[in-house]
Amino acid sequence: MKIAIAGTGYVGLVTGICLAEIGHEVVCVDKNQKKIELLKLGIPPFYENGLEGLLKKNHNILFTSDFKTAYKEAEIIFIAVETPENVDGSANLTYVYEVSNEITENLQSDCSIVLKSTVPVGTSDEVERFMKKNVSNNINIEVLSNPEFLSQGTAIRDTMEASRIIIGANSQEAANLLKQIYAPFNRPFVITSRTSAEMIKYASNDFLALKISFINDIANLCELVGADIGEVTHGMSFDDRIGTKFLNAGIGYGGSCFPKDTKSLHWLSKDRGYELRTVRAAIEVNELQKTRLIQKAKKQFSSFNGIKVTVLGLTFKPGTDDLREAPSINNIDILLGEGAIVEVYDPVGMDNVKKIYSNKVTYAKTPEIALQDSEVCFIFTEWDQIKQIEPSQFKKLMKSPNVYDGRNCYRRSDMIDSGINYNSIGRP
Ligand code: UDX
Ligand code: UDX
């Protein structure tokens, strides 16, 4: 089966390499020629665990910017371009339509089009209408919805060992084609209508976002009543209706999915005259949570002007170099706005941080260098390299050991016993 994938971002590239790994012939297409040049050399354009190894060893995958040839010969095309949010929170489908147009202009035989990008409910129907109108008369196309559930940092495992493969199709025949492609993964299939498939994606991500905002809300209350969020979630988790996952309190969710997927579904619900109030609450709690730690620190430092501040951990979560919607950015902007002297450390995200802050902050090679002579330390990502810092190091290296930990990386008693003024989330 000749497969083409439009977009070599986190989703497109990981999907492509995993399909190649199970023996399909895959062509990955991207308009960004720099990315394509890197990929041809076997170099991933972003950090993702295990990706480089697979790229170097796999011979079933090709990379090109020549979309005309790639689409002309494809039997099945996955669309995995970005769907960023518009200012009003709705999803921007410009790139999806750009690619749909390129496909219809070049297709020379029947083809199945698979929408992998997260798109508003109803988009598969609209894209199919658009493509059928523009494609040559004698060519049959059918659009399928096949949302991704890969989490950055574990994206390859999440694809190869997917909890489920959702296939939204208007015909059994089209669904069977995708089932056949994915069969070697040996994962459960869920076949639905296209609109249900699109909704499954949003409902899943928004439910997880809601879970995080709920626990952050409870954590904030724990601080006021003297309870410990760690003990509370541990106690809750024995009920397997609640479970253990996505109950880590912190400074809120970031990344390329939850922030935009909550806003997009909320926008859609309002547009249809039924506002999703739970999703609105998840968004509002998250917005406040992102700067909650700095608001706490402001009780101690009326201004950060001229103060050396260390920031440990910048990516939106560990295991990725991605800074999209990372809470660290909101906080660094506030610190710089107040005239703080900011030194940052992240084990893999530094190159991307440099693109944002250039010479406005100092970049440390190790957490120890970043902590030297600092008066306040903020922790925004729970990287192992950060969790492994001995509490005594903060005391030894910092000018005054004020630590604001946004991911509850340390045992509170260890930090306090080491003489640190330690503040975290949801703990007395
Ligand atoms: C994905 C999904 O597609 C998005 O809907 C989901 O909600 C989050 O994850 P992601 O893989 O993270 O997006 O996107 P990104 O890393 O921005 O990559 C998209 C790629 O598509 C880029 O390399 C871009 O150059 C390429 N592209 C975009 C094209 O090749 N052609 C276009 O017309 C537009
Ligand atoms: C998410 C989905 O999990 C995945 O299925 C897919 O649809 C894409 O979007 P991703 O954004 O890569 O994956 O990361 P995820 O692990 O879900 O974390 C998202 C954010 O939530 C991170 O900022 C993380 O720090 C935060 N988070 C997660 C918490 O604050 N607490 C938790 O308990 C879990």
Image (cartoon, rainbow, N blue to C red):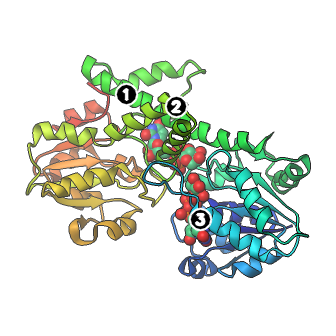
Could you tell me which secondary element the residue under label 1 belongs to?
A: helix
**What residue would you read off at disc 3?**
95
Give the number of callouts. 3
Q: Which mark is residue 183?
A: none
Residue at 87% x, 53% y is: 174
Which residue is at the front of the view, 150 or 419? Answer: 150
Type of amino acid under label 1: Asp
Type of amino acid under label 3: Tyr
Foreground disc of the pair 3, 1: 3
Could you tell me which secondary element the residue under label 2 belongs to?
A: loop
**Any atom of ligand 2 within 8 Å of the CB at mark 1?**
no
**What residue would you read off at disc 1?**
217
| Residue 326, image x, y percentages | 39, 52
Could you tell me which secondary element the residue under label 3 belongs to?
A: helix
Type of amino acid under label 2: Leu
**Between discs 3 and 1, the one toward the N terminus:** 3
- Regarding residue 27, the answer to whether it shows in the image is no
- Regarding residue 329, the answer to whether it shows in the image is yes
Q: In the visual, does 342 lie left or right of 324?
A: left
Which residue is at the front of the view, 315 or 282? Answer: 282
Residue at 70% x, 66% y is: 100
